Each structure stands twice: as structure tokens, then as C-alpha cells.
Amino acid sequence: MGRLTQTQRSLIIGSILGDGYVRIVKGRRNAFLEINHAFSMKEYVDWKYEILKDIVISPPKIRKGNGNRVAYRFFTRQHPEITKLFHLFYKNGKKTIPDFGLDPISLAIWYMDDGSKCGTSSYYLNTQQFNLVDQEKLIKKLAKLGIQARLNKDKIYWRIRLLMADVPKFKEMVQINIIPSLKYKI
């Protein structure tokens, strides 16, 4: 296995910020990434697979979950660069926000995983899984890309809301990397 391409690395980072899960199996040296979405997101999973396929053993498969949930998922191979990302983003088994580079591809994937639009001008990154300190770090990462955001309370949890003035800039930055079936999000 060779080195990850920049696109693969950006996809993995965007997935870690969103719905992706990286882990190391006990007794193994390197980590792997699991991509797991609802079957309704098949096109999206297949798109991620195409980018990562040279580090994946087998293509995505359907998996029945709890109740009526049907998932569609795949796993990468264990890879030393994924291990580095694991150690960077996970502390004591929990996702955290380290010092890392956020780029437009990572941002688009993060948004496709965990972003939402309310009405025509409110755009959110559903970051409720992160503590407030980490969410503030993410807001600073967005600012480095020229996108201003604030914390917004969603019931009892906080999430990131993009400032309306920067929504056009955000859309311009990510739209090239948003797959057709998820264009409704922008």
C-alpha cells in the first residue's frame, strides 16, 4: 500500500469530522476507517468508495441494523497514515479537534455527512458530538477558510451555524465536491 493521495486524506478528515469512524483492532498496529451510512445514501457511499478503493479490501455492502435500519458500509485496510490520523483526532477513545488543515474537500465531505440547511439561508454543521472547546476550534478552522460561523443552541446541544453573509462563499467553495444526490443540501 502506498501513501494516501491528498484527496483521500481530505476525504478521511472530512469523514472523521462527520460520520466516519476510525479505530485500531486490539493486537493490530494500524487503524482503519469505517464508512457507514443509511442505504438511502448509497450514491454517497459508492462515491467515497471510488476515491478510497485502492485502500479497501471489498466494496460496500448492505447491513441490517436495529429495527428497520438498513446501512451501507465499507472499511478501509489498516494503513499507517490512517493510524496517524487516529492518534491525531482520537483521545481516550473520543473524537477531538486537534491542530489540522481543513480544506474545501474536507469541508464538503464534513457538510455532506453532518451538515444541514434550514430555509434558504441558515446552514449548520451538526457538531453536537464535540464539546464547546472543540467546536470553537472548528469555528477558527472555518475562519481560516474565510467562512465566519458561530455556535447556535439546538434544543440542549450546541452546533455550528454559518453566518448568512458567508453562505455564498461557503457554497462556492464546496459545491464542486457535493455529489448530485446531496445538492439539495446547498
Image (cartoon, rainbow, N blue to C red):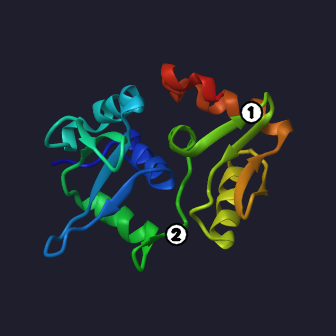
Of the residues shown, which amino acid type is indicated by label 1? Lys
Q: Is residue 183 above or below residue 95?
A: above
Of the residues shown, which amino acid type is indicated by label 2? Thr
Q: Quadrant of residue 70?
A: top left
Q: Nearer the viewer, residue 88 or 47?
A: 47
Residue 177: mark in rendering? none
Tell me which numbered mark, 2 or 1, is placed earlier along the sequence: 2
Q: Is residue 60 above or below residue 4?
A: above
Crowding around mark 1 (Cα neighbors within 10 Å: few <14, some 14 to 19, many 20+) is some
Residue 96: mark in rendering? 2
- Where is residue 165 shown, x and y percent of the image? 86, 37
Residue drawn at (50%, 50%), measured in percent from left and top? 18
Q: Quadrant of residue 111?
A: top right
Q: Is residue 157 above or below residue 123?
A: below
Q: Which residue is mark 1?
A: 169
Q: Nearer the viewer, residue 2 or 128?
A: 128
Q: Circle 2 — which element?
A: loop
Q: Residue furthest right?
A: 165
Q: Could you give the CA–CA distance between mark 2 and mark 1, rounded to whole angstroms?
A: 27 Å
Residue drawn at (38%, 25%), measured in percent from left and top? 43
- Where is residue 97 shown, x and y percent of the image? 55, 66
Q: Nearer the viewer, residue 152 or 2?
A: 152
- Where is residue 118 shown, x and y percent of the image? 74, 35
